[in-house]
Every structure is written in structure tokens, then in C-alpha cells.
Amino acid sequence: MNLTIRQNAISLNTAAAAYAEVGRFDKAVEMASNALRLAQEEGQNDLASSIKTRLALYQQNKPFHGSL
């Protein structure tokens, strides 16, 4: 994964969903955690809130099915 993606909360959130969809929950949690941190740092409160919801699913080994 390139540096640009690692610095973009939306891209990390999308990558997390993709990892979860294929059962890579460890990577999904990692990506979602990074996305959450970035969103919070950037003051993107709505995005941070939705990432928290998805992160909870990934921590339970469940994928997210819905609109990102």
C-alpha cells in the first residue's frame, strides 16, 4: 500500500472494508484503526463515528455490508 493511501482516512476505511470482506479481519482492524485516528486528527467527526461502528464489526470478525 502506498504512502498516499496511508494518509487518507477514506481510503483506509475502504481498504478496511475490503479486507473484512475477504476475511482478513486483522488487517481490517489495523486499517480501520488508522482511518479512525486520521479522521479524528482532521476533525472529521461524522467519518470517525462511522469508522468506529465498522471497527466494532471487524473486531467481532464481521464484515460491513452497506454504503461507505
Image (cartoon, rainbow, N blue to C red):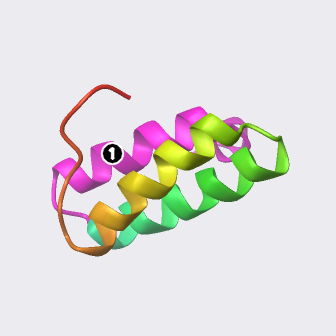
Disc 1 residue crowd, few under 14, some 14–19, many 20+, Cα 10 Å: many
- The quarter of the picture where residue 34 lies is bottom right
Q: Position of residue 32 (x, y in %)?
A: 50, 56
- The quarter of the picture where residue 14 lies is top left
> Which of 31/64 is in front?
64
Residue 27 part of the magenta segment = no
Q: Residue at x 49, y 49 (%)?
A: 51
> Which of 53/10 is in front?
53
Residue that mark 1 sits on: 17
Which stretch is magenta? 1-24
Q: Residue at x 30, y 53 (%)?
A: 19
| Dot 1 amino acid type | Ala
The answer to whether 49 is drawn above or below residue 28 in the figure is above
In the image, 55: left or right of 31? left
- The quarter of the picture where residue 36 lies is bottom right
Q: How many marks?
A: 1
Q: For the residue labelled by badge 1, is the local secondary structure a helix, a strand or a loop?
A: helix
Q: Residue at x 81, y 41 (%)?
A: 43
Q: Residue at x 37, y 53 (%)?
A: 54
Residue 21 part of the magenta segment = yes
